[in-house]
Amino acid sequence: MALAQAPTPPMGWNSWDCYGTTVTEAEVLANAAFMAEHLREFGWDTVVVDIDWSDPAARAHGYNDDARLAMDAHGRLVPDLGRFPSAAHGAGFAPLADRVHGLGLNFGIHVMRGIPRRAVALNAPIWGSEVRAADVADPANVCAWNPHQLGLDHSRPGAQAYYDSLLALYAQWGVDFIKADDMLWPYQDVEMEAFVRAIERCGRPMQLSLSPGRDLSLTRVDHLREHATMWRICDDLWDRWDDVAANFARFARWAPWAGRPGWPDGDMLPLGRIGLRAERGEPRDDRLTPAERRTLMTLWVIARSPLMIGGDLPSTDPATLALFTHPDVLAVNQHSSNNREVFREDPLVLWAADGPAGVRYAAAFNLGDEPLTVWVDAQNLGFPADAGEVTELWTGRGVEAVVVRGQWDAPVGVAPGSTALLLRLDAHGAALMRQTP
């Protein structure tokens, strides 16, 4: 069974931005139920339990050293029963996955690269193998930011056997999506290949998301496309304009490679009610302005990034939720091609993309701290000179346009014979446009 590809960018919800290491079964189910009722029809279909679901003492704002992670007899992490009571009697995540599947959704979990330190300390026997945890651990290849794992020494056959045992367990639970962490910084090519082999052997198709994407080079793109459904291109993204702005350059590099079999990922959308028990900050509605929220969504959509909501869905305000239920906007993310940055002169950034049946899309961004009013040549957006009908998708309104007949009546920078489009962009704002033949 091969690594599951995604024909379009994956869309879902992840517990990290709101609950950090502490999410509970009830909270996962509440968000799954909300997604099924309000978002599923718009394409949102995956629910992911993020890191430390096995730590009985998990807390906000960090990780526990020497955590007594819940494990089975073979050194494989299992859900903490205090937070995931349905995992009792060795059931693991299977009952929760069944509940999520019953809502018409996919179920995902976060895992760390390597093998738990606790499994090594106990020298647990590796399921399906003659070796033990201490035989395959690599203490020289450890995570720089999480204390729970040691690396695996893949020169020893038992290392692959350990990953095979993990994925066999996850297949038994009914996992559809895995976020595998500490894979990309530094780049762990041998670990990725072993993990994908284990997916291929487990008998269940699973999508694989790799993170974090700090300092990720385009020289890795062919390997990534072969060994991941999606991969992060940045470190953790939070509700700060500087974090959003920094991804413009990254998406400009990576967007030309977005498409089946893999998707460059700008990280979760830290929108709505976040920080409830998270790594960073206290409970809050995200600190982005309305214009910045729309800009974040517009950039992720036009770059065809996976879309993973980070806010707690039931307690997120309706205005923010409306960003996730706009079919014309989401169509750009799911059904466009040739997505690319075409212009960048501070503060204006322009993107272009092709749609089905001759439709063309464009996005305009104002990275400046003041509102911007600017005439843009339609051809600079990838539209034809005679642009005809151009609609701003967030508002559904037509974009004011003037066909330039001669240089004497042309807005500055618009070629004679072309269409000039008037854009009014808020500070840190965006417009997303569709040109219909």
Image: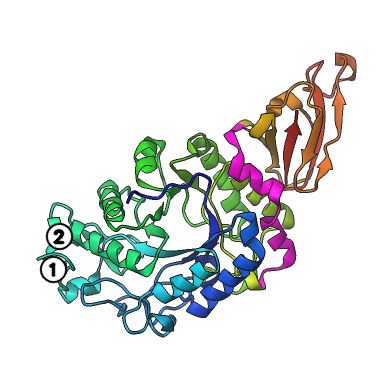
Quadrant position of residue 146: bottom left
| Residue bearing the label numbered 2 | 158
Q: Is residue 106 above or below residue 66?
A: above
Q: How is the image coloured?
A: rainbow
Q: Amino acid at mark 2?
A: Gly
What element does badge 2 sit on? helix
Q: Is residue 330 above or below residue 172?
A: above
Q: Are marks 1 and 2 in contact (CB under 8 Å)?
A: yes
Q: CA distance from mark 1 to mark 2?
A: 8 Å
Q: Is residue 89 above or below residue 428?
A: below
**Image coordinates for residue 203, horizontal then vertical, percent:** 31, 57
Q: Amino acid at mark 1?
A: Arg
237 to the left or right of 186:
right
User: Does the magenta segment cover residue 336?
Assistant: yes
Residue 25 visible in this rendered orientation of the protein: yes
336 to the left or right of 137:
right
376 to the left or right of 264:
right
User: Does the magenta segment cover residue 279?
Assistant: no
Q: Nearer the viewer, residue 203 or 44?
A: 203
Q: Which residues are magenta?
A: 315-341
Circle on res. 132: 1
Give the quadrant of the C terminus. top right
255 to the left or right of 141:
right
Q: Determine the residue positioned at 58% across, 34% down.
A: 337
